[in-house]
Image: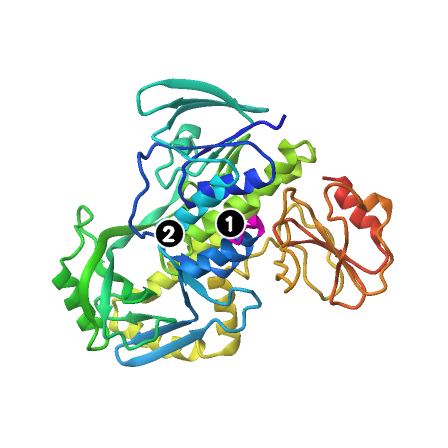
Amino acid sequence: MTDTVLISGAGPVGLVMALELARYGVPVRLVDRMAARAKTSRAVAVWPRTLELLERAGGGLSAELVSLGNPVTVANIFAGASEIARIELKEVVTPYPFVLMLPQSETERVLVRHLAERDVAAELGVELTGFEPDEAGVTATLRHADGREETGRYGALIACDGAHSPIRHRLGLSFEGNTLGNDWAQGDFHIEGVPFPPSEFATWWHEEGPAVLFPLGGTRYRLILGLGPSSGAVPPPPSFETFQAILDRRGPSGIRLVDTVWTTSFRINERQVNAYRAGRVFLAGDAAHVHSPAGGQGMNTGMQDAMNLAWKLALVLRGLSTSPLLLDSYDPERRAVGAEVIATAGRMTRLATLKNPLARHLRNTVMQFVLGLPMVQHALEGELTETATHYADSPLNGVSWQSGPRAGERMAPVEGEAPYGAGDMPRFALRVGAGVEAPPAGVAGPLVEAAPRPNPVEGGIELVRPDGYLALSVADGEWGPVAAYLAGL
């Protein structure tokens, strides 16, 4: 029987991890010391790549999320009354060409229900109090809300337990980085007089700090404000009247806050763990990386950590792979992505918070030109939507043929086809060109979909990973490298 995986932390990352493992036939136990789920919105952006990967779970999961949220297709940037950029998400090849604005509480509610359909429920009020890892798994101690303790054996432990991760501390892993020197406030409000349709969000650069307005649907908006340099403890969030006054100074006239749903204040940390894996213990989400909310990619990056790890862990725990490369690849693949997200979000934050008047003038002039270039907009679209995420230096990459996609690149979903990695087993997909001979017996087996898919490129063979990234590509008839790659798993 497959060993049970223990997941500590039942937020979006832990929920996705549990859902992925459960659909691949791996028993999971999901615990969290919180007594009840928060009802506040918190993270509100779900990007296209996350929706693509969630679609693999079946049951109409991504479609259900889309039906509940507000799709946004345009990002506007202003400096005073001047428009710096208008970035339209129109060139991304995806079934979801938008950022979905949806409160985290709603995202969690949908994930919880889909998990329940697989007979998995998060155990709230249950805290991981200790664990001892070894080469084959982890022995963990759990404490229930009534004080009862239990000790059990698990095939792996996954830390989805947040930025202050007790698991990370217990392992002695460093969380390297720094805290940026500005205070911030955010809140959800009902707002009137916004001069944009609900399909657009806006950022205003201002000498005092930025203001960002995200439409959550109807009259509800998320407002984020830079409050200036930090001093002492994090201040409480501004009053309703102060939120309004700051928005009046930085944004266009006529926007009126009607009432408050929720507010908070915070500081931005940029940190990343020095290793995403310690034997059979893995870290994902905020336990592994935290960064500026600019770009709204924190929750998405964590959920994609889970989807990267789950198929690899499933193949190992189900005895379908003995290659150490599978689990070894999780750290270099996702740590490189985490570092890039931290760097990109940090650059966006620093651009928006420049204090020097000359630097702000140069920023506005240069960015107005640069962000108007089609190639720059296309690159920025790829970064924001995470469709440009790739694993160029992955130890799992095979050879790449000619000038087509390179190993490690995302393979865009094809309309009318099942998503890569869908179903109850993490299978690789073969794409073959017209007239390519049938794969030999050495390529068949439980790791590969039964029937090859058509390759729109004339000739050639592509092997696609269960998470939709290219494993290798070879010329027509070169089945040897494909068979050797699969045999190596």
- x and y percent of residue 64 in the render? 47, 56
Q: Distance between the residues labelled 2 and 1?
A: 18 Å
Residue type pointed to by label 1? Gln
Q: Do the residues labelled 2 and 1 touch (CB within 8 Å)?
A: no
SS for tag 2?
helix
Q: Which residue is drawn at 30% across and 44% down?
A: 38
The N terminus is located in which quarter?
top right
The C terminus is located in which quarter?
top right
Q: Quadrant of residue 164?
A: top left
Q: Is the magenta stretch mostly helix, strand or loop?
A: loop
**Viewer can see residue 327:** no
Crowdedness near tag 2: few (<14), some (14–19) or many (≥20) residues, C-alpha within 10 Å: some
Crowdedness near tag 1: few (<14), some (14–19) or many (≥20) residues, C-alpha within 10 Å: many
Q: Give the range drawn in magenta.
A: 56-60
Badge 2 or badge 1: first in the primary sequence: 2
Residue that badge 2 annotates: 106
Residue 249 sits above or below residue 467 on the image: below
Q: Which of marks 2 and 1 is in front?
A: 2
Residue that badge 1 annotates: 304
Residue 372 sits above or below residue 63 on the image: below
User: Is residue 172 shown in magenta?
Assistant: no
- x and y percent of residue 126 in the render? 37, 28
Name the one closer to the observer, 93 or 96.
Answer: 96
Q: Residue at x 34, y 66 (%)?
A: 351
- x and y percent of residue 21 in the render? 56, 39
